[in-house]
Image: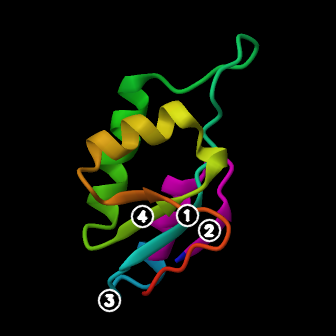
């Protein structure tokens, strides 16, 4: 599943895909989650919210490997990587992923 930059909608996208094609297993979700790192002037997701996102993603798509980009945010990537126990990786320009 390719999401582009999900603009805080990655859970909605994953849930919609599962509801439209419930008989198919998603093996890969590839895209930015757009969870912005705080610079003092924007709200950011708390560790608890990021933990909830991680849990929901792995519950919605239990067989998936997740790849996310820079727009997910450094703090979010750090927390999600920890909570998703090896199911999340950051992608970068030129990266090759075999699906």
Whichever of labels 1 and 3 marks the residue nearer the N terminus, that label is 1
Does 71 sit left or right of 23 as displayed? right
Q: Is the residue 70 above or below the residue 91 in the image?
A: above
Mark 4, other Cα within 10 Å: few <14 / some 14–19 / many ≥20: many
Which secondary structure, mark 2?
strand
Single out the mark in the foreground, 2 or 3: 2
Mark 4 / mark 2, whichever is N-terminal: 2
Residue position marked by numbered label 1 in the rendering:
13
- Mark 4 and mark 3 residues within 8 Å of each other at the beta carbon: no
Q: Mark 4 points at which residue?
A: 66
Q: Label 2 vs label 3: CA separation?
A: 20 Å
Which element is circle 1 on? helix
Q: Give the range drawn in magenta.
A: 2-17
Q: Distance between the residues labelled 1 and 2?
A: 8 Å
Instruction: Give the labeled residue for mark 3.
Output: 23
**Numbered disc in front, either 4 or 3:** 4
Is 53 drawn above or below residue 17 in the view shown?
Answer: above
Q: Which of marks 2 and 3 is nearer the N terminus?
A: 2
Q: Which mark lies nearer to you, 4 or 2?
A: 4
- Front residue of this view, candidates 62 and 21: 62
- Please tell me whether mark 4 or mark 1 is closer to you in this view: 4
Q: How crowded is mark 2: few (under 14 residues within 10 Å), some or many (20 or more)?
A: some
Label pair 1/2, CB-CB below 8 angstroms? yes
């Amino acid at each position: 599943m390719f999401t582009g930059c999900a603009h805080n909608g990655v859970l909605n996208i994953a849930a919609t895909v599962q509801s439209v094609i419930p008989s198919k297993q998603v093996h890969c979700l590839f895209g930015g989650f757009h969870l912005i790192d705080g610079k003092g002037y924007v709200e950011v997701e708390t560790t608890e919210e990021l933990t909830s996102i991680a849990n929901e993603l792995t519950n919605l798509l239990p067989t998936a490997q997740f790849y996310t980009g820079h727009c997910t945010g450094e703090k979010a990537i750090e927390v999600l990587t920890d909570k998703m126990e090896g199911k999340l990786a950051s992608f970068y320009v030129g990266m090759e992923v075999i699906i």
